[in-house]
Image (cartoon, rainbow, N blue to C red):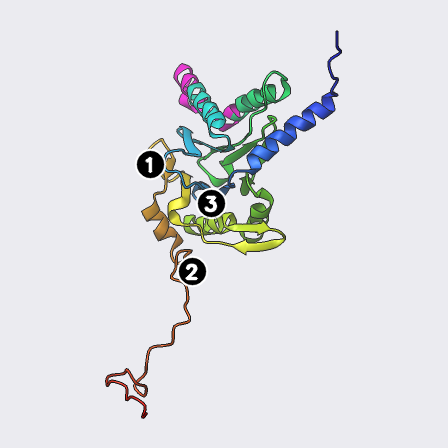
Amino acid sequence: MSMPFYVSPEQLMKDRADFARKGIARGRSLAAVQYADGVLLVTENPSQALHKISEIYDRIAFAAVGRYNEFENLRIAGVRLADMRGYSYDRRDVTGRGLANAYAQTLGTIFSSGGEKPYEVEIFVAEVGSLPEEDQVYRLTYEGRVADEHGYAVMGGDAETVSSYLAEHYVEGAGLADALAVAVAALGHSTDGGQTTDRVIPVGDLEVAVLDRTRTQPRKFARIRPARLEELLGDRGPEEHAAPETDAPPAPTADEPGSGEPPVAPPL
């Protein structure tokens, strides 16, 4: 009878963590930014069918990066938990902290068990309060760790580069238009091979949603459509699909042939 290979618990956890981090880094970054009237969630998502930002309950939003099928299962479980708790007790008993703790237990159990692979996901659970200081943004990692973020937070993709850009340009208490412009510019700020580049992300490739405390209805979650995004972002400089410059000669002036009279042929 052959003896099974022995792997130390430290090495096993390290391998599982590396596996999860690589899967999360392959996606695009997602940013959560607190502004004057609530919480703004922005990501680059060309797909119009698969959402990375969704609503959980009246004042609570869910955003995730990584494998879609895995974080979609977590979103559905969170919606069911929130509905059950709100129906059994009171709608005010459904809080972002309670959902974040439930997600942390689930992710931590999956990561530490050796029977299945760890989830390649990271999650934001955001809740808007009646006042700006009551807003809450929780970041959950693949291993079930919970972090209470303030101001702004980034996960997925090149999160360090995007976060460093927000650290330099984020302004506390800014309006929606200013916060959105900074978040979109941060997502377009990337580093490749030591070179830093800034690109203009097309409006059609953006997925944006807010938790707006100024809304009169109990549900504070709202998506921002492309038409509204164009109004908020305004002129962001040259677009990616602008006509390329050519080497064609300039248009003739009044002193050159072609300005109104046919050119005179040179003598033979």
Q: Residue at x 36, y 42 (%)?
A: 224
Residue that mark 1 sits on: 216
Magenta segment: does it hold 63?
no
Q: Residue at x 59, y 22 (%)?
A: 117
Q: Nearer the viewer, mark 2 or mark 3?
A: 2
Q: Residues within 10 Å of mark 1 (few under 14, many from 20)?
A: few
Q: Residue at x 62, y 51 (%)?
A: 193
Residue that mark 2 sits on: 237
Magenta segment: does it hold 91?
yes
**Tally of marks:** 3
Q: Which residues are magenta?
A: 83-99
The one nearer the camera, 175 or 196, is 196
Q: Quadrant of residue 51?
A: top left
Q: In the rendered view, tell whether residue 39 sits above or below residue 181.
A: above
Q: At label 2, which amino acid type do we have?
A: Gly
Q: Residues within 10 Å of mark 3 (few under 14, many from 20)?
A: many
Q: Quadrant of residue 220?
A: top left
Which tag, 2 or 3, sits closer to the chain's start?
A: 3
Residue that mark 3 sits on: 35
Q: Which mark is residue 6?
A: none
Q: Nearer the viewer, mark 3 or mark 1?
A: 3
Helix, strand or loop for disc 1: loop
- Magenta segment main secondary structure: helix
Q: In the rendered view, tell whether residue 50 sits above or below residue 194.
A: above
The one nearer the camera, 5 or 169, is 5
Query: In the rendering, at what x and y percent does residue 73 appear?
Result: 46, 23
